[in-house]
Amino acid sequence: MTKFKASTRKDLPQIAEKLKLDKEQILDMQAVSAVLPFRVNDYVVENLIDPSDVPDDPIFQLTFPQRGMLEETDYQRMRDLVVRGASETEIKLAADEIRGKLNPHPAGQMELNVPKLDGEVVAGMQHKYQETVLFFPTQGQTCHAYCSYCFRWAQFIGDADLKFASKEAEELARYVRENPQVSSVLITGGDPMVMKTSILRRYIEPLLAEDLPNLHSIRIGTKALAYWPHRFTEGEDADDFMRLIGEVKAAGKHLALMAHSSHSRELEPDIAQLAVKRLLDAGAVIRCQAPLIRKVNDDANVWAQLWRKQVQLGMVPYYMFVERDTGAKAYFEVPLARAYKVFTEAYSQVSGLCRTVRGPSMSASPGKVLMDGITEVGGEKVFALKFLQGRDPSWVNRLFFAEYDPKATWLDGLKPAFGEDHFFFEEPTKKNQPESVRKP
Ligand SMILES: *Cc1c(COP(=O)(O)O)cnc(C)c1O
Ligand code: SF4
């Protein structure tokens, strides 16, 4: 059996050797990774990254923090410390200071949409859209490797004990029972597939009870097909997961793996394809989604190839996301106008079977908003946008327009088109209301 081993900053010498990094590159990595930690494993380093293409290699960009993610002065400061052999304590102190300036908590997602049981907030759940509850099992709050643009590691916490898992699982099932509008539970993280199947079972089995007829589907968000396909192919634990899928099916529910799938390269190794096959044979559906990230996949041909590969293997393209406001945002962000172009160019070269994908979509505070077109209305160039999901269900599938802005990267940077004062889903601003309704 292949043993999983995570590598972090202290393993840089071995990684440098495998990736054939030169001295400058190693210095770079030492400086940057003191602030922005990385975590990879040998499978990713040896099978997904092409050393001859570092640093431009897309999976290298995906998994290793880069110099451009820090402000130049911060970078120089860290580099100076590394060059003069400063102590780990000194390096950590400087790193903490720089981290304090970054924003690890995007869009207030954790504070909003917290569900309640008996009037008490339930930890580890989020309920924003009527039909779907997000569940963050305490045991699943890490990943087989970290994506360099993801700041979820900021909330990754140490391991809680199993008693906690059972209590969480019981609360989740009770919440679904008491909220009959919920038809789908999405187990997410981190990556829930870092958990042993026996632990995952504690969360899933209570959801299969007969008194939860409202629950139609269970989804598991995971990047393991890309970062550690062995999770699905090797050993008793993998077999047990296949059995668990069978049990979910036998209980009459749909089981979907929501695969974080960024680049077709991830689906090329035989072991990744074997993992897909086993999951499909066991009865799961695999739906694929990923954000559009500069330097990783901001290329129409990469997406077209990715969607084709997914369909070829029996997976279903689902979402292309716009990357939201995380710490190193300037490094990764792709303007909405460009995202639309990449999506459209990719979409137009694939068959209808690939066109189950939707995007580019922003998971913004009012809802999931699709960047649906760039067009002209009455002589004004505008963005056409549409709600795929709304905090208010009556917003779903509603179109709206914003002024064309080639630089805008997110919903909150857009202005309503046609000289309007606010978008329909926002409160009117005071200054533009007529005097009579303006409050003091
Ligand atoms: C995307 C998302 C969901 C699931 O939405 P679907 O359109 O059903 O895939 C649920 N909750 C939140 C907060 C989401 O962002
Ligand atoms: S796999 Fe998902 S949660 Fe984990 S680091 Fe990547 S984006 Fe973040």
Image (cartoon, helix red, strand yellow):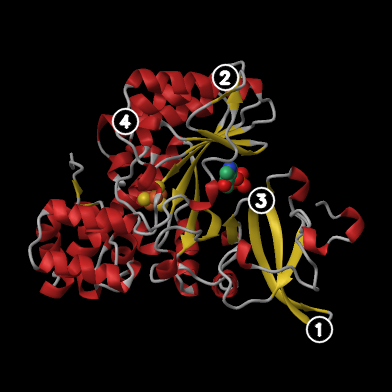
Where is mark 1, residue-wise? 379
Tag 2 residue? 174
Element under label 1?
loop
Which tag, 4 or 1, sits closer to the chain's start? 4
Q: Assess whether mark 3 and mark 4 are in contact (beta carbons under 8 angstroms).
A: no
Q: Amino acid at mark 1?
A: Gly
The amino acid marked with disc number 3 is Pro
Q: Residue at x 18, y 68 (%)?
A: 79
Instruction: Tell me if mark 2 has few (under 14), some (14-19) or many (20+) residues whose alpha carbon lies within 10 angstroms of its own.
Output: some
Distance from label 1 to label 3 (Cα)?
A: 28 Å
Residue 127 in the figure: left or right of residue 439 = left
How crowded pointer 3 is (Cα within 10 Å; few <14, some 14-19, many 20+) is rated as: some
Q: Residue at x 64, y 76 (%)?
A: 405
Q: Position of residue 131 (x, y in %)?
A: 66, 36
Q: Which residue is mark 3?
A: 366
Marked residue nearer the N-terminal end (2 or 3): 2
Tell me the kind of residue under disc 4.
Lys
Q: Badge 4 is on which residue?
A: 196
